[in-house]
Amino acid sequence: MKPVKFSPEVRERAVRMVLEQRDEYPSLWQTVVAIAPKIGCTPTTLHGWVSQHQIDAGQRPGVSSAEQQRIRELEREVKELRRANEILRLASAFFAQAELDRVKSKSKA
């Protein structure tokens, strides 16, 4: 089954609800468990959103959303550069061999 995608607006609203109602429950988890069904997500999903919000706000240690995005971009760039380097390496070997073959055939003539 494909996971349901929630819009950023729904995520923000859900996190805001948890933060606003946090004092009404004995723990953050119980707050999340109470609100998750109202949003239509699992408590684990909502807890992850709240945790990421706290990381982005500097209230909890971890990798921020902006840093995660930058890491993904850099990983994509590294993959592309490795592919380009492999193509260049193969092309260089091909042309070097062609030059050797040309020199050999020229010296035999």
Image (cartoon, helix red, strand yellow):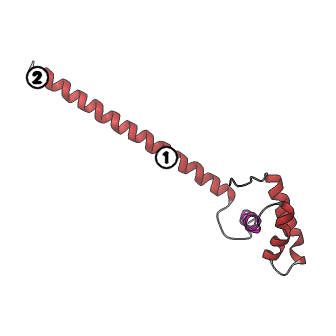
Q: In this figure, which residue is indicated by the disc labeled 1?
A: 79
Secondary structure at numbered mark 2: helix
User: Does the stretch in magenta take in 24?
Assistant: no
Secondary structure at numbered mark 1: helix
Which quadrant, please, contains the C terminus? top left
Q: Residue at x 79, y 53 (%)?
A: 8
Q: Residue at x 82, y 63 (%)?
A: 15
Asked if 94 appears above or below 77 in the picture, the reply is: above
Residue 107 lies in quadrant: top left
Which quadrant, please, contains the N terminus? bottom right
Asked if 87 appears above or below 58 in the picture, the reply is: above
Give amino acid for label 1: Lys
Is 63 left or right of 99, judged from the image as shown? right
Callout 1–callout 2 Cβ contact below 8 Å: no
Is 20 left or right of 106, judged from the image as shown? right
Q: In this figure, which residue is indicated by the disc labeled 2?
A: 107
Residue 32 lies in quadrant: bottom right
Residue 66, image x, y percentages: 68, 55
- Residue extending furthest toward the front: 1
Magenta highlight range: 43-56
Give amino acid for label 2: Ser
Residue 48, image x, y percentages: 72, 65
